Amino acid sequence: MTKRQAVEALDKSLRDIMDRPELPFGGKIVVFGGDFRQVLPVVLKGSRAQIVNASLRRSYLWDWMRHLKLVRNMRAQSDPWFADYLLRIGGGTEEVNGDGDVRLPDDICVPYTRDGKDLD
């Protein structure tokens, strides 16, 4: 997920470019997508509080945004196990190790081979 600071920088730039400092994003419509339960912003050696604080939901822009929620998971229709797995991880009910990490099943992992074929 994009850090709120990057979105706020975009907001400030568009306000300046469009010469509309009173309007979020200078009056332009900006569309964001994502799942807050899947990927949090990356904060190098950040505490949980620092990571949460870096999320878009902590931005001054959040209340200006219109929030839409998808009601049908298209992938879930073809892979209900994976959809349920994501919900368990997002809901904090998936089993974790002593460090609080979730072990990904081998069958959903792609081994890194250094030859670039793992990206196909």
Image (tube, rainbow, N blue to C red):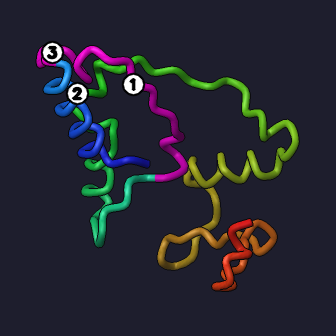
Secondary structure beneath dot 2 equals helix
Residue 13 image offset from top left, x and y in percent: 19, 33
Q: Quadrant of residue 76?
A: top right
Which mark is in front, 1 or 2? 2
Q: Quadrant of residue 16?
A: top left
How packed is label 1: few (under 14 Cα within 10 Å), some, or many (20 or more)?
few
Q: Give the residue number, with chain letter if any, for mark 2.
A: 14
Secondary structure beneath dot 3 equals loop
- Please determine whether, in this image, residue 46 is positioned above or below residue 40: below
Q: Quadrant of residue 5?
A: top left
Q: Image point 22% across, 19% down: which residue? A: 26
Q: Which mark is residue 20?
A: 3
Tag 1–tag 2 contact (CB < 8 Å): yes
Reading the chain from its start, which is encountered first: label 1 or label 2?
A: 2
Q: Nearer the viewer, residue 49 or 8?
A: 8
Given the image, on which type of amino acid does mark 3 rest? Arg
Q: Residue furthest front?
A: 17
